[in-house]
């Protein structure tokens, strides 16, 4: 079964279709054949603007994890041989400092439905029972529903679309590298980062996931080649937005002091 034909999903897709088509119609006098692509960009910017509070929470969560890192290290040193005590004291520390070990993943999770919706808008022939006119839209002669990889396999990739593909990949990769260099938190066990954590029962060990997520922007550059052009536009715009947002919030929300009870304080 096509998931986009499921009632609630089809209704959401139809609503999104109406928004993109309306924006495209409004932009046509100014953008011409690129109006639908520009509509996708504007929708992306609107979605990211709505997610600004989530971005603020993500930065605050990162600052909170950095703040309690010395206390976590001290707990692991003190109770490292008593796993039950370490679990209890670690959970107490998280609760007292109001820190969630899984905080910060929400922005990425919230964008999955958005990317899925844009993906669906440009791959299915009918939306909630009516023809999908977005499939006729293009940018620089490339249909928004086609991927760069599909053009390569069919031998229809020309100079303009090849340059566009290279541009999208380069922008995502460069912004990803800048994010790693300037904004990313040092990972546990790395120079400048907190000590590597000892696995604690009952407390999620996110070190492996965080290492994987640190490479996600580079994976996004590859994914952009295999999804419809409309989805690739979403990916490049949201990548640039994320970098700019994190840069601004990092200056507006400096790291909190290292622990309310002092860096060296260790819970009893």
Image (cartoon, helix red, strand yellow):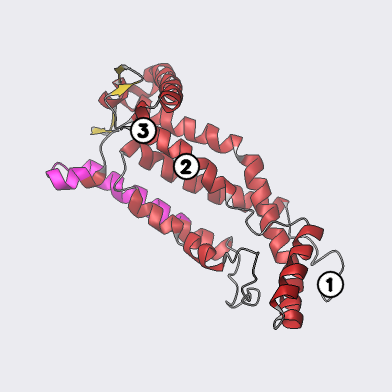
Q: Which residues are magenta?
A: 150-175
| Helix, strand or loop at mark 1 | loop
Residue 267 is tagged as 1
- The dot on residue 112 is 2
Say whether disc 2 or disc 3 marks the residue closer to the N-terminus: 3
Describe residue 50's horizontal placement relative to residue 28 as left or right: right
Residue 250 vertical placement versus 188 (above, below): above
Is 42 rendered above or below residue 159? above
Q: Is residue 240 visible?
A: yes
The prevailing secondary structure element of the residues shown in magenta is: helix
How far is mark 1 from mark 3, CA to CA? Answer: 50 Å
Q: What secondary structure is found at the residue carrying circle 2?
A: helix
Residue at 78 percent of width and 60 percent of height: 256
Name the residue: 42% across, 23% down.
7
Q: Nearer the viewer, residue 7 or 54?
A: 7
Q: CA distance from mark 2 to mark 3?
A: 15 Å
Task: Give the residue number, with chain letter if any, for mark 3.
Answer: 3
Instruction: Indicate which disc, 1 or 2, sits on the residue closer to the N terminus.
Output: 2
């Amino acid at each position: 079964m096509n998931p986009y034909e499921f009632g609630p999903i089809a209704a959401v897709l139809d609503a999104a279709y109406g928004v993109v088509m309306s924006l495209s119609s409004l932009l046509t006098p100014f953008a011409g054949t690129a109006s639908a692509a520009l509509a996708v960009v504007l929708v992306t910017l609107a979605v990211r603007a709505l997610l600004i509070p989530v971005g603020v929470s993500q930065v605050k969560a990162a600052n909170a994890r950095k703040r309690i890192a010395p206390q976590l290290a001290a707990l692991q040193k003190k109770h490292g041989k008593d796993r039950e005590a370490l679990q209890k004291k670690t959970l107490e520390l998280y609760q007292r400092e109001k820190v969630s070990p899984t905080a910060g993943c929400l922005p990425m999770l919230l964008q999955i439905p958005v990317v899925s919706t844009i993906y669906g808008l440009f791959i299915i022939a009918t939306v909630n029972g009516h023809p999908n006119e977005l499939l006729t839209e293009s940018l620089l002669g490339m249909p928004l529903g086609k991927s760069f990889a599909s053009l390569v396999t069919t031998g229809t990739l020309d100079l303009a679309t090849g340059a566009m593909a290279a541009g999208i990949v380069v922008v995502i990769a460069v912004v990803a590298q800048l994010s790693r260099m300037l904004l990313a938190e040092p990972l546990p066990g790395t120079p400048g980062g907190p000590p590597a954590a000892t696995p604690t029962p009952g407390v999620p060990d996110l070190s492996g996931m965080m290492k994987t997520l640190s490479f996600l922007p580079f994976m996004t550059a590859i994914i952009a080649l295999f999804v419809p052009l409309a989805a690739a536009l979403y990916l490049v715009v949201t990548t640039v937005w994320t970098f700019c947002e994190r840069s601004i919030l990092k200056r507006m929300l400096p790291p909190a002091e290292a622990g309310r009870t002092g860096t060296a304080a260790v819970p009893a």
